[in-house]
Image (spheres, grey):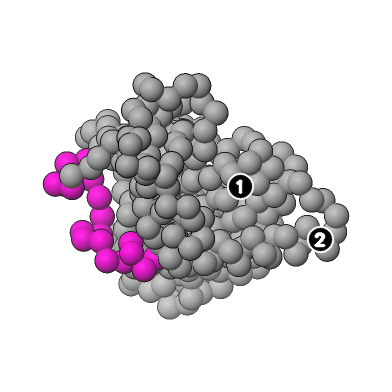
């Protein structure tokens, strides 16, 4: 995983108050909890003393107590008390574990995945989703790298084949574009699929007039939205568990119905349909080899794969910037 980036890794409701939560993300065991102000803390889930799981311990006055020998950690990962030495003896600064910066945004928990905490870039989210939307959410674990998961949602070529009886009806196999546009770390791509009459052909991005097309977006490195209409969206966060597993948080957003009860039914129905689409994707993505992707890996991409190529190029660029 590329460092020095904000990754969406949990849903906010997975870290309730007064509870320690242990999960694996980014290939590392992490412990999460909320302090009395509601702020989420995140430290490595491994006691520096004898390696016990800190998330198996308990909360003591906003701090975490190891279940093995009672070491008490604060949110910065520093040991504040070693019971065997006495409360009056301040532990040396070397008694600590790695901690991570945390931000919450729109019901998601993000961590700053980095070895440094000085030059932290602002957290980005889809600004339009912050306005007047309601959403339903479900989650799924896929047994593959997060790059495969997110690239699937960038793949405009697969729709009439994988989703031939749902969102891909109409046998629209020819791809116009896609046209792509970068704004900092947000990539927007515009695309149109049309039926192959035997006489027409694909159009390049330069041949596409304007931007009045179907559009999708990602914000690097792992959040995505499908802009179905101005008032209807599908969103996903692809949280890396490790190199071979990803937790997908998928949301169905709508802002056209605000009436209590009716809006809940619409959100429920949207989530059920989204599960069908995601299951269709899952059957194919699980067969892809290798489980991860990178810029130059021997796959013979075509013009319709341009969003995927752009994503890989950007990931490679960000990796090189960290070297």
Tell me if mark 1 has few (under 14), some (14-19) or many (20+) residues whose alpha carbon lies within 10 angstroms of its own.
some
**Which element type, helix, strand or loop, lies under badge 2?**
helix
- Left or right: 186 as drawn, with respect to 148: right
Of the pair 124 and 147, the residue shown nearer to us: 147
Residue at (37% x, 57% y) in the render: 161
Residue at (57% x, 41% y) in the render: 227
**Which element type, helix, strand or loop, lies under badge 1?**
strand
- Left or right: 276 as drawn, with respect to 19: left
Residue at (40% x, 29% y) in the render: 179
For marks 1 and 2, give the CA distance.
18 Å
For residue 281, above or below residue 115: below
Of the pair 194 and 265, the residue shown nearer to us: 194
- Indicate the position of residue 275 as horizontal and vertical percent values: 53, 66
Q: How many marks?
A: 2
Q: Confirm whether residue 130 shows in the render.
A: no
Q: Residue 60's quadrant in the figure?
A: bottom right
- Indicate the position of residue 54 as horizontal and vertical percent values: 45, 69
Query: Mark 2 sits on what residue?
Result: 262
Residue at the left extreme, as displayed: 298
Residue at the right extreme, as displayed: 259
Q: Main secondary structure of the magenta part?
A: loop
Tell me if mark 2 has few (under 14), some (14-19) or many (20+) residues whose alpha carbon lies within 10 angstroms of its own.
few
Stretch in magenta: 282-299
- Left or right: 201 as drawn, with respect to 267: left
State which tag comes first along the sequence, 1 or 2: 1
Q: Confirm whether residue 323 shows in the render.
A: yes
Residue 258 colored in magenta in the image? no
Query: Mark 1 sits on what residue?
Result: 233
Quadrant into which the C terminus falls: top left
């Amino acid at each position: 995983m590329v460092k020095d980036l904000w990754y969406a890794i949990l849903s906010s409701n997975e870290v309730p108050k007064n509870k320690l939560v242990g999960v694996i993300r980014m290939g590392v065991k992490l412990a999460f909890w909320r302090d009395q102000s509601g702020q989420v803390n995140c430290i490595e889930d491994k006691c520096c003393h004898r390696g016990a799981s800190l998330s198996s311990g308990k909360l003591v006055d906003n701090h975490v107590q190891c279940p093995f020998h009672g070491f008490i950690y604060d949110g910065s990962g520093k040991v504040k008390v070693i019971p065997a030495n006495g409360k009056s003896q301040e532990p040396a600064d070397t008694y600590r574990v790695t901690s991570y910066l945390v931000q919450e945004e729109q019901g998601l928990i993000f961590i700053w995945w980095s070895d440094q905490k000085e030059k932290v870039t602002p957290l980005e989210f889809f600004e339009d989703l912050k306005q007047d939307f309601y959403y339903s959410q479900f989650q799924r674990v896929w047994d593959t790298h997060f790059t495969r998961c997110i690239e699937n949602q960038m793949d405009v070529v697969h729709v009439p084949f994988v989703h031939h009886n749902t969102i891909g009806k109409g046998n629209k196999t020819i791809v116009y574009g896609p046209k792509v546009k970068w704004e900092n770390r947000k990539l927007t791509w515009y695309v149109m699929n049309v039926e192959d009459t035997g006489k027409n052909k694909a159009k390049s991005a330069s041949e596409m007039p304007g931007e009045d097309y179907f559009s999708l977006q990602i914000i690097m490195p792992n959040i995505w939205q499908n802009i179905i209409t101005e008032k209807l969206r599908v969103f996903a966060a692809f949280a890396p568990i490790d190199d071979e597993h990803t937790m997908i948080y998928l949301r169905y957003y709508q802002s056209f119905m605000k009436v209590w009860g009716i809006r809940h039914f619409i959100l429920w129905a949207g989530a059920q349909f989204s599960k069908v689409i995601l299951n269709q994707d899952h059957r194919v993505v699980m067969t892809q080899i290798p489980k991860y992707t990178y810029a130059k890996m021997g796959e013979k991409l075509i013009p319709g794969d341009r969003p995927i190529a752009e994503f890989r190029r950007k990931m490679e660029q960000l990796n090189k910037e960290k070297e």
